[in-house]
Image (tube, coloured by chain):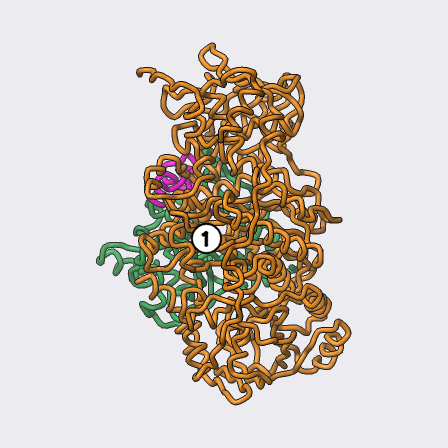
Chain colours: A green, B orange
Amino acid sequence: MKCGVVVFPGSNCDHDVYHVLKHVLDQEVVFLWHEDTSLKGCDLVVLPGGWSYGDYLRGGAMAALAPVLAAVRAHADKGGFVLGICNGFQVLTESHLLPGALRRNAGLRFECRDVWVRVERADLPFTRRYSEGQVIRMPIAHGEGNFEHFAGELDRLEAARQVVFRYVSPTGEIDPAWNFNGSARAIAGVCNEAGNVLGLMPHPERCAEEVLGNKDGLALFESLAQGAFGRLAGAAR
Amino acid sequence: MTTATQPRVDLPLARELGLSEDEYARLQGLLGRTPTLTELGITSALWSEHCSYKSSKVYLKEFPTSGPRVLQGPGENAGVVEVGHGWVAVFKMESHNHPSYIEPYQGAATGVGGILRDVFTMGARPVAMLDALRFGRLDAPRMRSLVDGVVRGIGDYGNCMGIPTVGGETGFHPSYDGNILVNAFALGIARRERIFKARAAGTGNPILYVGSRTGRDGIHGATMASDAFDAESEKKKPTVQVGDPFTEKVLLEACLEAMRTSAIVAIQDMGAAGLTSSVFEMAARGGVGFRLDLDRVPLREPGLTAYEMMLSESQERMVIVAKRGKQEEVARVFRRWGLEVATIGEVTSGSRAEIVHRGKVEASMPIAPLTDGAPVYQRPVAPPADLARRQEAPSVPEPGDPLGALEALLATPELASKEWIFRQYDHTVRTNTVAGPGGDAAVILLKGTPTGLALTSDVNPVYCFLDPRTGGRQAVAEAVRNLACAGAEPVGLTDCLNFGNPERPEIMWQFRECVRGMAEACRALGVPVVSGNVSLYNETEGRSIHPTPTVAMVGVVPDLGDMPASHFRRPGRRLVLLGTDRGEFGGSAYLRLLHGVEQGRPPAVDLDAEARLARLLRETVPWGIVRTAHDFAEGGLAVALAEATIGAGMGATLNVPLAPRDLFSESQARAIVAILPGQLERFLEAAERHGVPALEVGESGGDRLVIEADGARIDVEVARLREIWTNALPAALGL
């Protein structure tokens, strides 16, 4: 699987995603520059976390207008895989490749901690190595992750099964005490209708190696690698 | 745009800018004439306490600064130490106290920005930060908003940069009511052969300016930072710089990329005293001269004078000496990242600075006498008149209710969890964080190796106030102990020496004694000082802060697979108490926070005992049998055990041969370890061989902390302790 990690000025999780794809899963990875108009033949495009262009306006608002986004949109329209993590998720909602919006956290403060997340769909190319209803632990680190949409649209998202991850308690219950940013319906990640574009606030790339004490995020990248080749390219590692 | 009439240069103006009468005369002597306004401004910045270390220099010489791993000691932007596998760690700590008190958000943010530039200007990618913060009482005027502003400022800057804040410390004490401390530490890593220095060379090589444009912010920041506070301090707000973390992030990436072009001779960030200190220091280190054409400096607004340009502390700017004919290679990289680049001058032969603006020579000065030859003072030193009273042995009441005392201590902002603060800092970005904030030492992975880097920052200002020599020794010893609890061998130390007004003999005495204590401990424990910073004049209306020599230490964990945690993780581990209690309460949290008594001699620091304890831990941790190691600090055994059980909610039952009050004694060189059950004998043998007193006292397990002492018992649910400990700080902040 050829993977591209987009670098906006201000991206700061670009190296982390690159590391997991390249050194943990042994995939081919290139960096894509924000002014690029071609995706260099990548099967998967990752929009990483960070502060694209400083995000002084609103998370992802400027990046949604970057030249590379036109190419990302064309890739998505053709059914190519697009993964947005944290700031990348914000870029995807701002560019309407994903529904909804990410507002300031309900507590109005940046939150960095581990959260428990329930996998709502395990039939996506991104999640096939998880099981439905599985509760996993992932780090969050964001100030604007409070997912919001119009009530009717939220119902429609649920009906179309576009909610992929939800913040839950360690035992898998939806509970306001475990929904740290106040997201509507505890939504932590959503996909588009076709299921080839995924955005989530938690950082799977930060929990993909044993040495960091948590490998719960690795299966997301393994799912994609497995999807591309019908087998797990990096399984030997 | 009207050109304001420039003020007349004379002694009163020189004084206003912070120069003494002698210093002004010295400058006139150097030049053989009356200085221009620009020359006066440059000199007042270079000779400020902040830039020249004129009061502290004579004592800083006492630190050991070399060792087999040290590639760069003090004198560069940061220290450089080998950490194995071809990697070096580049680190430094710096204060941003004065700006943070005047304007907490920007002051703290630009403190982070400044220390990060010090690290990446040496060619290292910053990978971890620590922050050592000291606040006053939370009910003192402005204090809650200062806490909030500082925490937001550090968070917004570091989070945007994508560099994890993995640890640090936060203290609260009335001596900081009118002068808080913000000490920021950054560590970067680089390949051994890829280190860059700020040593200008090569006549005719162009001097490039890169990064943000120059504005009027921060003019005379260095001078402001070299003055005490009074009722007028609010007016100093315009001397505080304004940070832009996004520009710093692209500057970081562009600098690291430009350093791969082989077109860079030297590079230095513009920190305190901006263009002045960066260019003068680079030239002084290289023994060359320079010429600057200020008409080429990129400006944020038109009409800045030469004086303003030379003294602006606008952030996110760097100076580069490029190889002649190759500057375009460098410029291309910066332009790709959307940054300003300008050639503003060149390296000249000889040893003079020539600064031209609008066709007029604004400054023509010899360089070395202003930098290396800056004034050095041996200021008068005298112990405080009330020292004997301060050190008088206090009476120590028995706790009627030891559990109540423990709960009361855990509920103080001083000893409570700092989670509310560190949750606002990204501590997992870069995917290296093996042990984050909240434990003894933070530990990050050196990617591609089994090795970890352990980081800690320590100082007990109350100990330093009661006996600065002992306090200085204790800060270093505690840092070594914290590293040893992770199995790490210390490889280097950086410091921020925060004190009051050095013109007062009592303050200078505190300074000298603290430095001597630190130097003794560094020698005994084998830790070189590789960088650091001095912050003086930390006082308001004549009231000084407690002496606060913050120590940040870096260690190497050879193999992360064996590393113990600082809390209990599994039941059935045998608990062993290391070290000896001597019932020491001078300056203790028990007396200070529960009985309002800040008096006595602080606990003695036996450097030999510290060295033995550290050696024992470093030998046994790689055996994989030490699963938990946690040292004793403020609040003694009781607080340390509470922390060790709260960490993962794993209880413990112990029986210790101590009087109830001695559960809170702060004798040094002590720790609790949890050993794999079948390995106890092996561990105890090692302890005996190293001469470390070791006593098996109980085991981990259950959900309660049970401590049996002589005639007293603490028996409490860990969950209850956790609740008290976690909620105390937000509650005290009124959240």
Does B504 appear above or below B393? above
Chain letter of mark 1 equals B
- Magenta stretch contains residue A63: yes
**Span colored in magenta:** A46-75
Query: Which corner quadrant holds the C terminus of chain B?
Result: bottom left
Question: Left or right of A92: which side holds B132?
Answer: right
Residue A215 horizontal/vertical position (percent): 54, 63
Using the image, determine if residue B300 lies above or below residue B432.
above
Q: Does residue B653 lie above or below B57 as drawn?
A: below
The residue wearing badge 1 is B545
**Crowd around label 1: few <14 · some 14–19 · many ≥20 (10 Å):** many
Please report the residue visible at 63 percent of the width from the left and 26 percent of the height from the top: B200
Front residue of B55 and B304:
B55
List x then y, in percent, for residue B726. 41, 69
Where does residue A193 sit, x and y in percent of width and height?
35, 53
User: Image quarter for residue B195?
Assistant: top right
Amino acid under disc 1: Ile
Q: Position of residue B728 (x, y in %)?
A: 38, 68
Q: Would residue A160 appear left or right of A131 to someone viewing this image?
A: left
Q: Residue furthest top?
A: B359
Query: Which residue of the protein is positioned furthest toward the right in this rendering?
Result: B689
Image position of B580 (left or right of B726) = right
Viewed as shown, does residue A78 lie left or right of B624?
Answer: left
> Looking at this view, is A119 or B675 the one in front?
B675
Q: How many marks?
A: 1
Q: Is residue B679 magenta?
A: no
Q: Quadrant of the N terminus of chain B?
A: top left
Of residues B73 and B657, which is closer to you in this image? B657
Q: Residue furthest front?
A: B385
Taking the image as drawn, is residue A184 in sight? yes
> Does B108 sit above or below residue A117?
above
Residue drawn at x 59%, y 54% is: B514
